[in-house]
Each structure stands twice: as structure tokens, then as C-alpha cells.
Image: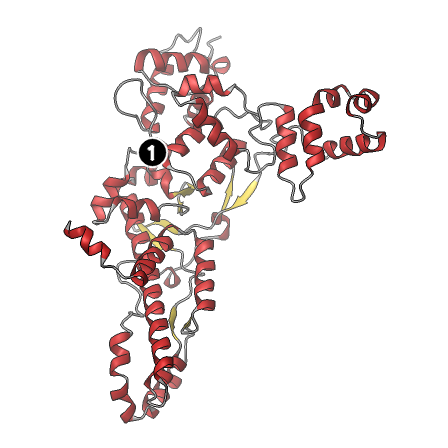
Amino acid sequence: MLGLRQTQRLSPILTQQLQQAIKLLQLSQLELMEAIELEINENPVLEIKEEEPEESIQEQTEEEPIEEKEDMTEWLELYTASEEISSEYANFEERNYPDYENMVSKTSNLRDYLRWQIGLSDVTQEERIVAEWILENIDDNGYLAYPISEIASASGFSVEGLEKILLKIQKLDPPGVGAQNLRECLLIQCRMESEKDPLLENFLINYFDLVEKGNIKDIVKKTGFPVDLVKSLIEKIKNYDPKPGRNFGDDHVFYMIPDVYVAKQEGEFDVFLNEEDIPELHVNSHYIELYANKSTNGEDRKYIKQKVKQAEWFIKSLQQRQRTLYLVAKSIVSFQTGFFEKGLKALKPLILKDVAQDIGMHESTVSRITTNKYISTPHGIYEMKFFFPTGIGKEEGNELSTNVVMDIIAEVIKDENKAKPFTDDEIVSVLKKSHNIKIARRTAAKYREELRIPSSRNRKSQ
């Protein structure tokens, strides 16, 4: 009850400030820039600090009236936010940035591109696992290759849960992706248009079978629409892509801005924050003078005091965000050193609680700070949550991390009959029967390819 009473005593202003601090933790780099800009626009006391020449600073100090220093006492007690950057993390401005090419991520296929977009979406950890099952069953044309019922049977997730996440995937780029048939693919593209067309949507829903046959006379007869209208609707449909994934080549490029850089220097991995676009903030000196001036009326002083408190909290929250980001990234590197050295195969099982205990913070804080954040590694750019493998489900027992499953696949292939090697479907069956591991065929194929193991046809002994 003591904790409850203490919580109830929190003022609305403090609660709002705490909410703001929590919000800053989970913002992406771009969202953080927008939040800073918004705060500066809403709080006249807060501004971006510009570097001043040393001579100018010295002149201001020498010219400051002695009698004003006593008036500043209350102000100095009020404004206690440190303008020094925390020594617990390195400021990347003092280092050389990696080549710009390292900030560009090339997708290997459509599913990787969709996976990246899911990483930027507002989904829970469990929803990400569900999404992974769906993504692994999307073919190169962008369609769902198997019915939801089959994916539900293989994954153990409910049809309703899968359909809920599928709707989110269907809102991703390219338009029409994740459809279960051509009509749904076109409908998705129709509904994503900036200008809604209810008539076209209704046309696709109720008369698509006639459209597929291409007989305009039958369409006019069944719908009662004028010939010109029917032709116009069909022309609009022709502008949609019936295979949204087909134009997605291996050289498709999209840009991710890393929040953290990890580079090996003198035999050890160093962690640097990307603070290139994060401005240093401070309180506008004009308001310091107003507050210190005895002629400023009480209401104005009260207003300034309130705005200064807001500015102080925002600056501290921003610094705390950066410090937390650094500590979490450093802990991840410590736990996953094998990955940074050797790549995916050396990725270890890791949960948020491990990092939280390592840095002495709450698990929810680690969860928030790893949301929508990216780390530039020697092996490419990865979302921070990537370093917390959710594992592969087992029918009985604990989940296995992906690298463990990959090792098992390697062993299965190693012991196979070389005259009749396992197909990817057979590998799935062996994993389920011998190891109680449930994965999709596409997942097995992906892991096999990452292990650089050829297909069964190319493994077959001559």
C-alpha cells in the first residue's frame, strides 16, 4: 500500500514528465528529431546550443554585473540540468563516421524487406513471431503460398491470430503483398489509394469473376453499368500490379539510419552512438535575464519557472535516453560477442531480462530502448531486437535459438544418405519427428542457404 500511496501523490505535471521520458526511450532516430523540434517550438525557453568563440564567452563573463550574481541564486538552484555529455558513453562526434555505404542495407529478397518493415511497426514480441511464420510463407510474387489454416496447423497459432497479423502485413510495401488470391491483391491496392474509389472496390468484390473472363458485354448485362464506366473501371484495374513481389530484385535498396555503431578497434569491439543529428540543447539566455530582472512581474516569472522545469526535464530525459541506449548496446555486444566475431551462426539465446540485470535497469526499459533502433555491425545493419532471438518452438520443452536449429539442420544433412539427400520438406519432417522442432519449409530452406549448403538436387551423389 505504501507504493500505491506514493504513486497517488505524484503530481499531474510529474506524471506527464515521466510519460515524456518513457516516450523518448522508444522513439526511432527520425522520430526523436521530430520530438526535439516539436519541444523547441512549444517551449520558448528551450533552444539549440550554438558554439560560441572563446573570446566572446570570456567577454560576457567579464561584463556581467556583480550585483546580478546574487539574483541568479534561485535560478541556478532551479536550473540544474547538466550540459555535459555523460562520460558513460562515447560521443561519436569525436570519431570518424563509417562510410556512407555502411548505412545502406540491401535486401536479399522480398521477405527480408517485409521483415525490416515489421521491425518498424508497432507490434509486440509475440506478434513478431506470428509475423515471421507468415513472412516465411509469402512467395516471390508477394502472395501467401499456403492457406492460413495450414500455417496455423504448422505453427500452433490460432487462425484468428494469424489473420490479425496478416492484415498488418497487407498494409506494407509493395502494395498488394500478402494477398491470398488475385482479387484480394487488387483490393488491397485499391484500398491503399490516397483517393478512395468505393465504386471500384465494390466492382472488385462483386464482379471480379466476370472481369477475369474479360467479357465486357456480360459485365454490362450483370451490373447494369454503362459500357464506358465498365471500360474505365477495367483500365483502373490494369494499373494495379497482379504480382507485387515480382519486381523486387536482389538489388532493391532501402536506407536505415543506425542509432549505434559497433566497430572493432585494437582487438575489441567499441560502441558509439550516432549523435550526428541530435542537437545539444540549453535554456535561452534571454529568459535567464528576464527571470533575474527584479522588474519582471510575478506572473511572467512563474511562467518562466514552469517552462524552465519543462526544459530541464526534457534535456535530462534526452541525456538519459542516450545513456540507456549506450549501456544496452554495450551489454548486447558483451553477450553476443560471438555474433560480432563470426556472424549469425554464433548468435546466442538472449532475453531482455539478461541485459536488464546486467545494466541494473528494468526489463521494460530495455524493451523500450531496443524498439525501432538499429545497430551497424561488421556483418551489416540489424534491428536491436534481432539480438534477442525469440527461438524456434518445440512441441515439448523450451524454445531453441535460431543458431541452434541451424546447427541441427547441418547435422541432419551431414548424416543423410548422399545418394538420396533430404529435401527441405523432408528436413522439416526430420526436425519435427526427431527433435520436436516445428519450422516452415521456407525457414528450413533459408537456414540451409545461410549455412551455404546446396539444395538436395545439387547435393545428390553422382
Q: Quadrant of residue 84?
A: bottom left
Tally the marks: 1
Asked if residue 438 shows in the view, the reply is yes
Residue at 38% x, 15% y is 413
Of 443 and 290, the residue lying toward us: 290
- Relative side of 222 to 156, left or right: right
* Residue 216 position in % (x across, y down): 82, 23
SS state under label 1: loop
Q: How is the image coloured?
A: secondary structure
Residue at 27% x, 46% y is 331
Of 442 and 154, the residue lying toward us: 154
Q: Is residue 68 above or below residue 414?
A: below
The residue that mark 1 highlights is 389
Asked if residue 267 shows in the view, the reply is no
* Residue 395 position in % (x across, y down): 31, 17
Q: Is residue 414 above or below residue 295?
A: above
- Relative side of 168 to 124, left or right: right
The residue most toward the left is: 2
Residue at 84% x, 33% y is 228
Which kind of residue does numbered mark 1 sit on? Pro
Of 331 and 240, the residue lying toward us: 240
- Relative side of 166 to 286, left or right: right
